């Protein structure tokens, strides 16, 4: 069953800190993708360096900063779209005075254990 949610803030955050708030929007083998919305805090909010076992597309909805993508550093801002291949280490850092909102789509769906990793260990070394 698919449930339409009118406002992102109606989804309870799975992670909430000064540095990052993440919400699981959609996931499962029946939809064949996982969608997560992550907000990075202002002035240095970040997620940890990490990778996934599946490809990820990240749309920067708001914010300005940079993304460490493998051995590269790429500037990102409103409207940027990143394609991160499976197993490539990456990290986003918000340098703006407002939060950065990222709309992340993982294809195919993440496993339950990888979702747990996203919502637990990526939170451990975030700055903010």
Image (tube, grey):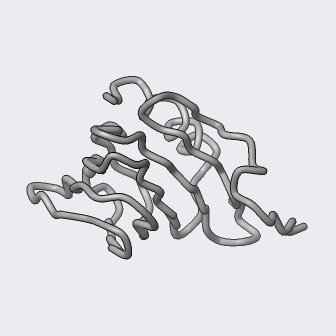
Is residue 103 placed above or below 44 in the rendered structure?
below
Q: Residue furthest front?
A: 97
Residue 15: image location, x then y, percent:
58, 34
Viewport quadrant of the N terminus: bottom right
**Of 88 and 104, the residue lying toward us:** 104
Residue at horizontal 87%, vertical 65%?
Answer: 3
Left or right, 9 with respect to 63, comes to right
**Of 51 and 14, the residue lying toward us:** 14
Q: Residue furthest left?
A: 71
Residue at horizontal 36%, vertical 58%?
Answer: 63
Image quadrant assignment for residue 125: top left
Residue at horizontal 24%, vertical 55%?
Answer: 65
Image quadrant assignment for residue 64: bottom left
Residue 84: image location, x then y, percent:
32, 66
Left or right, 57 with respect to 26, comes to left
Viewport quadrant of the C terminus: top left
**Of 92 and 97, the residue lying toward us:** 97
Q: Is residue 91 visible?
A: no
Image quadrant assignment for residue 60: bottom left
Is residue 92 placed above or below 2 in the rendered structure?
above
Residue at horizontal 52%, vertical 67%?
Answer: 105
Residue 119: image location, x then y, percent:
55, 36
């Amino acid at each position: 069953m698919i449930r339409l949610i009118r406002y992102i803030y109606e989804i309870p955050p799975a992670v909430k800190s000064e540095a990052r708030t993440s919400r699981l929007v959609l996931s499962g083998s029946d939809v064949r993708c996982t969608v997560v919305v992550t907000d990075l805090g202002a002035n240095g909010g970040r997620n940890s360096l990490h990778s996934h076992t599946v490809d990820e597309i990240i749309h920067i909805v708001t914010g300005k900063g940079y993304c460490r993508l493998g051995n590269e550093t790429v500037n990102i801002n409103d409207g940027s779209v990143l394609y991160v291949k499976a197993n490539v280490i990456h990290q986003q850092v918000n340098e703006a005075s407002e939060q950065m909102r990222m709309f992340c789509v993982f294809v195919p769906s993440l496993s339950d254990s990888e979702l747990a990793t996203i919502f637990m260990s990526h939170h451990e070394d975030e700055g903010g």
